[in-house]
């Protein structure tokens, strides 16, 4: 028999539906506005006719972006930082989270306090810059990866996940002759795919969207990631200095090109997320609950 909801419960449910709908629209409509502008003509954009649907549909803006070699070079740098940096992040985080998750490890309390300290107090910019400079990492991609190699938040999630793995399984592996590295790479990590996928998404999105580190530590335009290139295009007329097909440029507009570049920079993450979604929720929940 279907149970009827009370009046107050129906009001609460209706309020939640309206609130979530409005919240979703506040996130979706700006993106639809950007998409509409990226496919609209220069004349329609100049006259302000575009809202949430393309006006005078055209692909000229995307054609301009695809012909700009500097954008593709920045895209390659972002892919390299995201893939390579995320792999290093996961290896470093797992290497620290595994020993501190085992009860027999001595001195783990000190390490946990130090990691927690980094979450409360961030490193000031000037000391951070001096460290990067003295290590010879200025104008190198290492400056965009190594300073944030281990996130304290992600470390505690992975450590909590490792603590849920039965100790009897690890003890059995030791009896069979596996060392600690063998246990980590042959048993712990294969069982931790949901956690690795979740933290990989966290690290990957952070690398893909970061631009402050590149502004601080990179002076060579050839090493700029895509987000810095996008920032240049939005805040200046740098895109006018590139060698382009003039006919395509004449049919495009600076605003339309900017919107097309935003879509170009956002699309890779949107395409990757559906493949990791099934691991994402599971990994976040398992890493947050301890038996």
Image (spheres, rainbow, N blue to C red):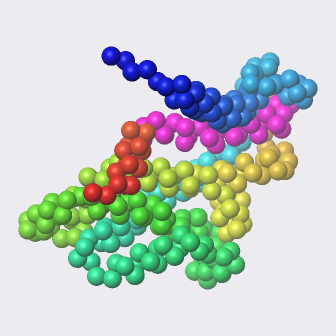
Quarter occupied by the N terminus:
top left
Residue 21 appears left or right of 237: left
Count of numbered tags: 0
- Work out whether residue 95 or residue 13 is closer to the camera in this orientation and state it: 13
> In this picture, is 181 found above or below 61?
below
> In this picture, is 184 found above or below 288?
below
| Residue under the point 21% across and 65% down | 182
> In this picture, is 102 found above or below 208?
below
Residue 212 position by quadrant: bottom right
x, y percent for residue 181: 24, 68
Quarter occupied by the C terminus:
bottom left
x, y percent for residue 63: 71, 31
Identity of the residue furthest to the right in this view: 47
| Residue under the point 46% across and 78% down | 114
Residue 267 appears left or right of 84: right
x, y percent for residue 120: 56, 72
Residue 206 position by quadrant: bottom right
Identity of the residue furthest to the left in this view: 176
Residue 258 in sight here: yes
State yes or no: residue 217 in magenta.
no
Most common SS among magenta residues: helix
Give the residues drawn in magenta, as a range: 250-276
- Work out whether residue 16 or residue 35 is closer to the camera in this orientation and state it: 16
Residue 249 in sight here: no
Residue 114 appears left or right of 181: right
| Residue under the point 66% across and 76% down | 124
- Work out whether residue 173 or residue 103 is closer to the camera in this orientation and state it: 103
């Amino acid at each position: 028999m279907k149970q009827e909801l009370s009046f107050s419960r129906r009001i609460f449910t209706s309020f939640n539906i309206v609130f979530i709908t409005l919240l979703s629209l506040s996130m979706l409509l700006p993106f639809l506005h950007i998409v509409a502008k990226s496919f609209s003509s220069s004349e329609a954009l100049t006259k302000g006719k575009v809202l949430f649907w393309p006006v005078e549909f055209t692909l000229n803006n995307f054609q301009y972006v695809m012909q700009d070699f500097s954008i593709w070079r920045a895209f390659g740098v972002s892919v390299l930082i995201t893939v390579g940096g995320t792999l290093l992040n996961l290896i470093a985080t797992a290497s620290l989270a595994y020993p501190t998750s085992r009860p027999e490890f001595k001195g783990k309390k000190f390490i946990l306090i130090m990691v927690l300290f980094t979450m409360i107090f961030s490193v000031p910019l000037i000391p951070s810059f001096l460290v990067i400079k003295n290590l010879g990492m200025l104008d190198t991609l290492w400056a965009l990866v190594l300073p944030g190699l281990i996130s304290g938040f992600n470390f505690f999630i992975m450590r909590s996940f490792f603590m849920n793995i039965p100790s009897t399984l690890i003890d059995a592996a030791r009896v069979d002759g596996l060392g600690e590295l063998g246990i980590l790479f042959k048993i712990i990590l294969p069982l931790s795919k949901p956690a690795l996928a979740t933290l990989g998404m966290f690290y990957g999105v952070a690398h893909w969207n970061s631009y402050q580190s590149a502004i601080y530590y990179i002076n060579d335009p050839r090493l700029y990631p895509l987000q810095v290139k996008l920032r240049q295009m939005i805040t200046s007329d740098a895109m006018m200095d590139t060698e382009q097909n003039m006919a395509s440029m004449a049919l495009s507009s600076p605003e339309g090109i900017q919107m097309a570049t935003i879509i170009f920079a956002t699309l890779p993450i949107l395409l990757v997320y559906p493949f990791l979604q099934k691991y994402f929720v599971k990994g976040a929940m398992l890493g947050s609950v301890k038996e």
